[in-house]
Amino acid sequence: MRTPTFSRRDRAPRPGRRRRIPLLPALAVATVLAAAVTALGWYGDRVAGQRDAAVREALATAPAAAKAIFSYDYRTFDDSVANGRTFATGGFAEEYAKTTATLKETAGKQQAVVLAEVSATGVVSAEADRVELLVYLNQYRRNVSTAGEKVDQNRVVLTLVPVDGEWKVSQATAI
């Protein structure tokens, strides 16, 4: 009887010997993975840059917006409200208009003057198209009912969104 003969291809690999991974497919896989990691890194950096720019712009706008929205003088009430309205947008602009309309008569009777000043701000959350800021707001108020000036220390979360290249307040929540 004859013993079967095997060609070199038919032999099992010798123990202890590693199989070689074909070089071209391995390089292709490595290249694709490197490109994917690079693309993800670039995208993450771009998103972070947009978010950081939004935060800078919102932080620059917030003090003027808070001062305009939360200040008024009974002698120039309509001008005060018009100034505040320039910083408001969306549903908050409507809410601001209703609130100030009901406040006008009382402000006149009380000869009320309220000056808002921002003492500090901090970022609550941020995306490229929406920034929430915690605003520490002092309101200095005078009227005929109080002797001297009173200070109300308030904390407000302002939500700012870009509208036609400017950041506007879309929501204000007292906390």
Image: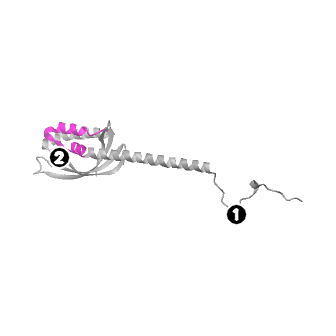
Q: Which of the marked residues, 2 or 1, is nearer the chain's N terminus? A: 1
Mark toward the viewer: 2 or 1: 1
Q: Residue furthest right?
A: 1
Which of the labelled discs sits on residue 115, or is there none?
2
Determine whether, in the image, residue 117 is placed left or right of residue 37: left
Q: Residue 62, position in %: x, y?
A: 26, 45
Quarter occupied by residue 107: top left
Q: Amino acid at mark 1?
A: Pro
Residue 127 in sight in this render: no
Residue closest to the eye, 125 or 15: 15
Quarter occupied by residue 71: top left
Q: Amino acid at mark 2?
A: Leu
Q: Main secondary structure of the magenta part?
A: helix
Range drawn in magenta: 63-89
Report the residue at 30% width, 44% height from top.
Answer: 57
State the quadrant of the N terminus.
bottom right
Check disc 2 and report its element: helix, strand or loop.
strand
Residue closest to the eye, 111 or 87: 87
Determine whether, in the image, residue 127 is placed left or right of residue 112: right
Q: Is residue 138 magenta?
A: no
Which residue is denoted by mark 1 in the rendering?
15
Residue 99 in sight in this render: yes
Number of numbered markers: 2
Q: Residue 147, position in %: x, y?
A: 10, 51
